[in-house]
């Protein structure tokens, strides 16, 4: 099987690009590690470009077997918190200056990703949200966000509880502690890396916002020391073998990776993508079955029903003939079905025979023309 054949049968995972500026031009991109892991486990990433109006064209990306939403700018606060958390204008300016690359709100990306998230929730399409993608999922389900963790959480924490969630001086190398909740998928993935009863791992961080009020359908999977939720999932929509997967992770397991290596901080880091793609593959199979089986079953049932009606009509006619040609009371209408079938069949046979005779006639004429010349005919 060639690579082109393989691409036709692999399930599709939609990923929305992020917009940036390079050489005074807009450039859309998606992190390579996301794409690498999706492909490694047997799915095809399909990039949805962050282009004006693309939110109206999402049906063009069908079939959708999974959605992965990842990094990006802050979500428009009016989508979940119209009062802007009571920040004074100078505080907002301070936040924008400190996190300039994130606070430039992209309403088009918000619209595209919220529509995709809601589509997944409506159809039970597997969904994995990383960082911003987890925040999109929570907002889509009615949850809210902290607009700035440092100003809303850190100032109320004791010194020992404070967590640095964004370190620009050690961007990829920065880690902080999280406590894993027992019995969750995260616990299952990192079980072999948890020391004793501590239930703790070190994760990376690239965010100044996070989940404030978790939507009702979700259950937390991990907490930072300051109480911030670092992962959550829908327990009623989690069974990768059956194509069920709805989850958000605030940290980036795909970036907890040694430079120029396939080695990760923990073996469980790859599990989020492995289990997600497993669900995507199962969902694609389930979708294919549901699209083909009912149609063929319905067709077979209709043909069988018509066959039985025609057989009964002929049976009644045979009984009438055997009994001397008398009418069988109340069954005249059933005879009509057989009569109509014979009429259609006779017309088909007659037309077929006429067609054969015409072809024979034409063949004879052509042979005669070749033998005696066209002037004789």
Image: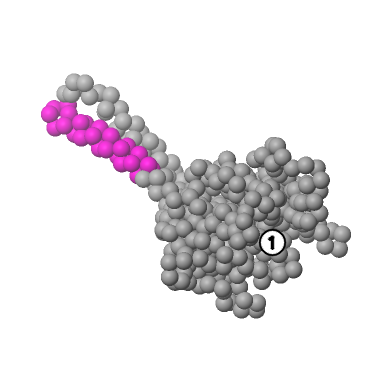
Q: Where residue 85 appears, x then y in whole percent?
A: 69, 41
In this rendering, is residue 43 above or below 152? below
Residue at the bottom extreme of this rendering:
261
Residue 350 against residue 74 in the figure, above or below: above
Closer to the camera, 242 or 255?
Answer: 255
User: Does the magenta-highlighted stretch encompass residue 322?
Assistant: yes
In this rendering, position of residue 343 left or right of residue 274 = left
Q: Which residue lies furthest to the right in this view?
A: 24
Residue nearest the observer in this picture, 338 or 44: 44
Residue at 64% across, 50% down? 156
Badge 1 marks a residue whose secondary structure is loop
- What type of secondary structure mainly makes up the magenta span? helix
Residue 118 visible in the snapshot: no
Residue position for label 1: 166
x then y, percent, for residue 144: 61, 43
The stretch in magenta equals: 298-325
The structure residue drawn at horizontal position 74% and vertical position 58%, both measured from the top left corner, is: 28
In the displayed structure image, the side of residue 228 where residue 185 appears, left or right: left
* Nearer to us in this view, 177 or 234: 177
Q: Is residue 31 left or right of residue 236?
A: right
Q: Is residue 115 magenta?
A: no
Question: Is there any visible trace of residue 75 in the rendered image?
Answer: yes
Q: Which colour scheme is used?
A: one colour
Q: In which quarter of the image is residue 304?
A: top left
Q: Residue furthest left?
A: 323
- What percent of the width, then of the height, locates residue 74? 70, 50
Quadrant position of residue 162: bottom right
Q: Which residue is drawn at 40% across and 45% down?
A: 294
**Label 1 CA crowd tier, 10 Å (few <14, some 14–19, many 20+):** many
Position above or below: 119 against 29: above
């Amino acid at each position: 099987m060639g690579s082109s054949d393989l691409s036709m049968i692999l399930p599709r995972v939609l990923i929305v690009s992020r917009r940036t500026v390079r050489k005074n031009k807009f450039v859309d991109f998606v992190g390579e590690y996301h794409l690498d892991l999706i492909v490694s486990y047997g799915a095809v990433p399909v990039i949805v470009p962050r282009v004006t109006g693309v939110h109206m064209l999402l049906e063009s990306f069908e079939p959708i077997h999974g959605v992965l939403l990842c990094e990006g700018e802050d979500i428009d606060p009016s989508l979940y918190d119209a009062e802007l958390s009571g920040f004074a204008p100078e505080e907002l300016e301070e936040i924008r200056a400190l996190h300039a690359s994130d606070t430039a709100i992209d309403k088009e990306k918000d619209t595209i990703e919220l529509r995709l998230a809601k589509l997944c929730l409506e159809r039970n399409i597997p969904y994995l949200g990383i960082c911003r993608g987890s925040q999109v999922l929570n907002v889509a389900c009615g949850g809210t966000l902290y607009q700035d963790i440092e100003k809303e959480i850190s100032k109320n924490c004791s010194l020992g509880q404070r967590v640095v969630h964004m370190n620009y001086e050690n961007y990829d190398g920065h880690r902080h502690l999280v406590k894993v909740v027992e019995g969750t998928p995260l616990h299952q993935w990192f079980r072999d890396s948890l020391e004793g009863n501590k239930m703790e791992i070190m994760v990376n961080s690239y965010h100044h916002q996070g989940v404030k009020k978790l939507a009702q359908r979700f259950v937390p999977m991990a907490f930072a020391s300051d109480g911030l939720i670092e992962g959550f999932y829908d327990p009623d929509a989690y069974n990768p073998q059956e194509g069920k997967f709805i989850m958000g992770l605030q940290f980036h397991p795909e970036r907890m990776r040694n430079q120029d290596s396939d080695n990760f901080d923990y073996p469980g880091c790859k599990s989020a993508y492995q289990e997600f793609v497993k669900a995507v593959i199962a969902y694609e199979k389930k979708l294919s079955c549901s699209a083909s089986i009912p149609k063929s079953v319905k067709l077979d049932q209709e043909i069988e029903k018509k066959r039985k009606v025609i057989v009964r009509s002929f049976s009644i006619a045979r009984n009438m003939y055997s009994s001397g040609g008398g009418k069988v009371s109340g069954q005249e209408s059933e005879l009509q079905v057989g009569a109509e079938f014979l009429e259609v069949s006779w017309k088909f046979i007659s037309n077929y025979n006429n067609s054969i005779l015409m072809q024979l006639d034409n063949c004879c004429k052509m042979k005669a023309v070749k033998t005696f010349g066209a002037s004789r005919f």
